[in-house]
Image (spheres, helix red, strand yellow):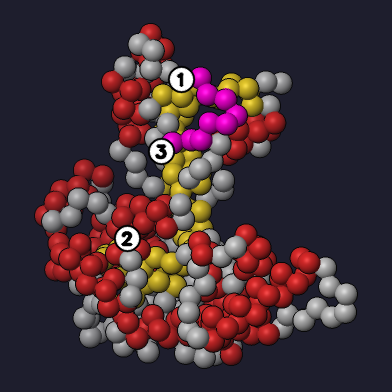
Amino acid sequence: MSSIQIGIVGLPNVGKSTLFNALLKQQVALAANYPFATIEPNVGVAEVPDDRLPKLAEIVHTKVIKPATVEFVDIAGLVKGASKGEGLGNQFLSHIRQTAAICHVLRAFSDADIIREGAVSPTEDLATIRTELQLADLATLEKQPEPKGSVKPVDKERWTAILKFKAEIEQGKALELKTMSDEERLVAKELCLLNAKPELFALNVDEDQLSRHEELAAQFAKDLGVSQHQVVVISAKIESELASLSAEDQQLYMADLGVTKSGLQRLAEVAYDTLNLQSFLTAGELEVRAWTITKGTHAPEAAGVIHTDFITHFIKANVASYADFVACNGWKGVRDQGKLRMEGRDYIMQEGDVVEFAIGK
């Protein structure tokens, strides 16, 4: 699959662009202390840190390491009335429809010098954003024509799904893909319904609160009425400082702060979990690389992530677990010690599989 794309959204001046700049390790978005500093969506690819890759590179003797990636989209700040075109509402809504998931950045820091511009509290700010997304979806649903006359079953199912979505949104409910039928899921995706997109939440806190990130995540999850697995507590300011340091200095700085993973690592992990993703690994003399797939993907489709032609020309997959590959010191070792498996078309890929695909002509 291509890079997963996550829209960074929130009210103005909650730290979206600062976080975006830090995550991408370059100042590609304008982080300014006034509303609508970000007018066009800024898009960039960030690497997902993976401690397994350097070890694989050492074993196969390559210096080329290519981690999995997450594509972050920094979208203009939303304000109340966006669904009716207030602020930059139309641009906001059109850009967010293209993303696979929504990352809500919510202000929980106390810097009085940063203009709030509508932000009140994480709970109220999220309610404002969700209301605008619900209103936008209602407008989309209300534009759909009711089928008349002799109706095909598929059209009837589509209309039933639309009526169900309208009723749920009017009741203030979220549209959850995992609870939908296959037919409903297709309609939600066809209409790009915003309330059906998976969500994660980045709580932007003061620097001195970062060491309590797990405790705060649990507290905010309860306040927001969401799963703690969807919440990441970060300090955009700290992430910005980390971005300017070497990898070694980053580790020392994080240790001083009482954290073991950067905001990027924790956001990427939450994104993977939220979107039901996992990685498989390839390791050769040319490069070591992590590839992103959906959980439950079969071997030929995984090969197709490398090149689409590999799906039809797939013969087999030579697979070793990461642990066995390291313990046996590479491909020769796993073969000699009977730890290499030959898997066919029905094999379901597992997290951390180290794979060689055999492809025919």
Answer with mark 2 or mark 3, whichever residue precedes in sequence: 2
Q: Nearer the viewer, residue 356 or 26?
A: 356
Q: CA distance from mark 2 to mark 1?
A: 33 Å
State the SS at label 2. helix
Is residue 280 shown above or below 25? Answer: above
The image shows residue 108 at horizontal and vertical percentages of 26, 77
Q: Nearer the viewer, residue 323 or 86?
A: 323
How many numbered discs sit on the rendered protein? 3
Mark 1 in CB contact with mark 3 (< 8 angstroms): no
Mark 2 in CB contact with mark 1 (< 8 angstroms): no
Q: Residue at x 35, y 52 (%)?
A: 269
The image shows residue 168 at horizontal and vertical percentages of 54, 80
The residue wearing badge 1 is 341
Q: CA distance from mark 2 to mark 3?
A: 19 Å
The residue wearing badge 3 is 351
Disc 1 marks a residue whose amino acid type is Arg
Q: Is residue 21 left or right of residue 191?
A: left
> Based on the displayed image, in which of its 4 quarters is residue 105 positioned?
bottom left
**Secondary structure of the magenta portion, mostly?**
loop
Disc 3 marks a residue whose amino acid type is Glu
- The boundaries of the magenta stretch are 341-350
Q: Which mark is residue 121?
A: none
Q: Which mark is residue 229?
A: 2
Is residue 87 shown above or below 254? Answer: below
